């Protein structure tokens, strides 16, 4: 019986060749066994790919999450906001490269945006500077089709024209293009507020 070297097939197929050759099983049975073995060995990858395709199709289904029907003003004025994260985006790719460590006295500051373009900044329980007033009135307005939020809070990060990255029921993410005082490079200051 002629044995065909098959380095590309699995060891179980080599075992089958060895078994057939030493037990004098006809070659056509070997070919039939080969095709059966290949079909069986293909079942696992095909089954896996089939499951993967099914999952992909299910995940592409229509989401039940409907976009908020609230206006940006309603989203902004619905609740009190607190600073969550602040950091620099050096290459302006939308990812914070250098997060700023926030002190506890900054994390408990509250910002209330009221309808009509006014608001109140509250220092919270912990004040970074005891001489600062507990609350400060501020003004705010949307610009450029509500893509920019202009806020004027004295002595605060939340001052100036901030481009809105995200504004939904729980998150307000903005950024401001600034000049890094150390390197004189133009960078983005990202500020994220949450409820």
Image: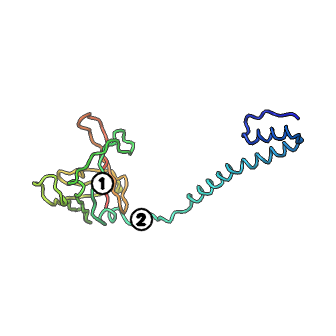
Q: Nearer the viewer, mark 1 or mark 2?
A: 1
Name the foreground residue: 65 vs 142: 65
Pointer 1 with pointer 2, Cβ within 8 A: no
Front-most of residues 90 and 131:
131
Any mark on residue 1, and which? Answer: none
Number of marks in the rendered image? 2
* Above or below 19: residue 44: below
Q: Position of residue 41 (x, y in %)?
A: 72, 47
Q: CA distance from mark 1 to mark 2?
A: 22 Å
Q: Secondary structure at mark 1?
A: strand
Rendering quarter of residue 187: top left
Pinpoint residue 3: horizontal percent, then vertical percent.
Answer: 83, 34
* Percent position of residue 152, x then y: 21, 54
Snapshot quadrant of residue 147:
bottom left
- Label 2: which secondary element: loop
According to the picture, the residue beneath numbered tag 2 turns out to be 68
Which image quarter holds the C terminus? bottom left
Horizontal side of 94 relative to 17 (left or right) equals left
Which residue is rendered at x = 84% and y = 46% of the image? Answer: 32
The residue at which mark 1 appears reads as 84
Residue at the image position 25 percent from the left and 65 percent from the top: 114
Q: Nearer the viewer, residue 164 or 181?
A: 181
């Amino acid at each position: 019986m002629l044995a065909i070297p098959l380095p590309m097939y699995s060891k179980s197929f080599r075992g089958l060749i060895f078994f057939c050759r030493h037990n004098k099983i006809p070659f056509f049975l070997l070919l039939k066994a080969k095709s059966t073995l290949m079909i069986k060995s293909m079942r696992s990858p095909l089954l896996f790919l089939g499951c993967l395709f099914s999952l992909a199709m299910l995940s592409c289904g229509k989401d039940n999450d409907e976009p908020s029907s609230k206006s940006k003003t309603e989203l902004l004025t619905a609740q009190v906001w607190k600073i969550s994260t602040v950091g620099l985006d050096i290459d302006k790719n939308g990812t914070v490269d250098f997060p700023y460590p926030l002190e506890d006295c900054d994390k408990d500051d509250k910002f209330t945006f009221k309808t009509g373009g006014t608001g109140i900044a509250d220092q919270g329980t912990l004040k970074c500077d005891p001489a600062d007033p507990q609350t400060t009135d501020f003004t705010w307005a949307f610009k450029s089709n509500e893509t920019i939020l202009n806020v004027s809070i004295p002595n605060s990060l939340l001052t100036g024209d901030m481009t809105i990255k995200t504004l939904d029921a729980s998150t307000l993410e903005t950024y401001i293009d600034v000049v890094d005082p150390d390197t004189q490079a133009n960078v983005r200051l990202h500020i994220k507020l949450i409820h």
